[in-house]
Amino acid sequence: MLDLIKTRKSVRKYSEKHIPDSDLRKILEAGRLAPSWMNVQSWKFILVKSEENKSLLSELSIGQPHVKNADALIVCIADLDTWTKAGITKIENPTINPALQGENGLLIRTMEQIVYPISYMMLMAESLGISSCIIGALGNEITGTNPDLYKKVKETLGLNDNQILSTIITLGYEKEPINIPKTRKDFDDVISLEKIGNKF
Ligand SMILES: Cc1cc2nc3c(=O)[nH]c(=O)nc-3n(C[C@H](O)[C@H](O)[C@H](O)COP(=O)(O)O)c2cc1C
């Protein structure tokens, strides 16, 4: 598992080779099985393979070429309505009920949940030899950029007002495999024992 995590990297150039549907299903299944707050599963995933929708989503992502050139995309939707549907809103304690944490709290919690399936799907893809890149630089309710195009994307993908297009995962086979060393903060810089600054 650690080797997989170490070798995964964001890939932005893909070969022409297509990902079999059976592998796409495995990746999506890994996302579906991710954990969430009280099992609310406040997410939807849209698999995009058509050139038309890839182009539209690339445009939404400030023209990032890898969104257009990826073999497939997984559009990750944070669904604000799920909490009500799951009955969690009936719980009166705000500590365990994000709906009582204010509008911002609910938004943050819903965005928080989507990170887990995204991570699961990226690692599942990597385990199948399929590269990926997370796309967060796009127009949506969070960034507030490109509202007209975002409206068009939401209509095209069938999203309602409470469904936020949070992230896109690009998927494909790496065009020219290269080994880039991971640039990360040092272990002791980010990990402490008992108290910030105490080494583990
Ligand atoms: C929330 C989030 C948003 C990101 N948005 C973009 C993006 O819009 N475009 C892009 O090319 N990479 C994006 N990335 C990828 C990061 O740049 C990349 O993960 C980081 O530089 C570390 O490199 P690595 O993934 O190769 O280890 C994003 C990553 C995260 C976690």
Image (cartoon, grey):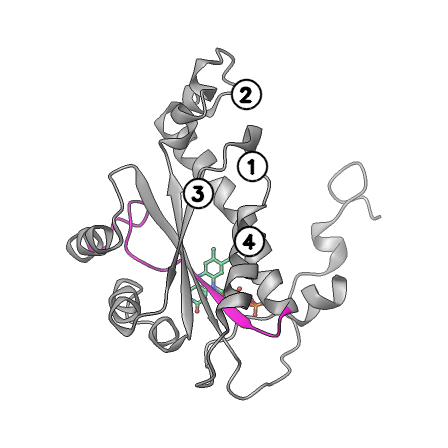
Region of the chain picked out in magenta, as a range: 128-146
Q: Position of residue 142 (x, y in %)?
A: 33, 46
Residue 136: in magenta span:
yes
User: On screen, 8 above or below 78?
Assistant: below
Q: Position of residue 78 (x, y in %)?
A: 40, 43
Question: How far is disc 1 from disc 2 in space, using C-alphas?
Answer: 12 Å
In the rendered structure, which amino acid carries the disc numbered 1? Ser
Q: Is mark 1 within 8 Å of ligand 1?
A: no
At 58% from the left and 45% from the top, the residue drawn is 34
Judging from the image, what secondary structure is the residue with disc 4 in? helix
Judging from the image, what secondary structure is the residue with disc 1 in? loop
Q: Position of residue 63 (x, y in %)?
A: 28, 71
Tag 2 residue: 96
**In the image as oriented, which residue stretches furthest toward the front?**
22
Residue 85: in magenta span:
no
Q: Are marks 1 and 3 in contact (CB under 8 Å)?
A: yes
Q: Nearer the viewer, mark 3 or mark 2?
A: 3
Question: Label for residue 29?
Answer: 4
Question: How far is disc 1 from disc 3 in space, using C-alphas?
Answer: 10 Å
Question: Label for residue 43?
Answer: 3
Q: Is residue 132 left or right of residue 185?
A: left
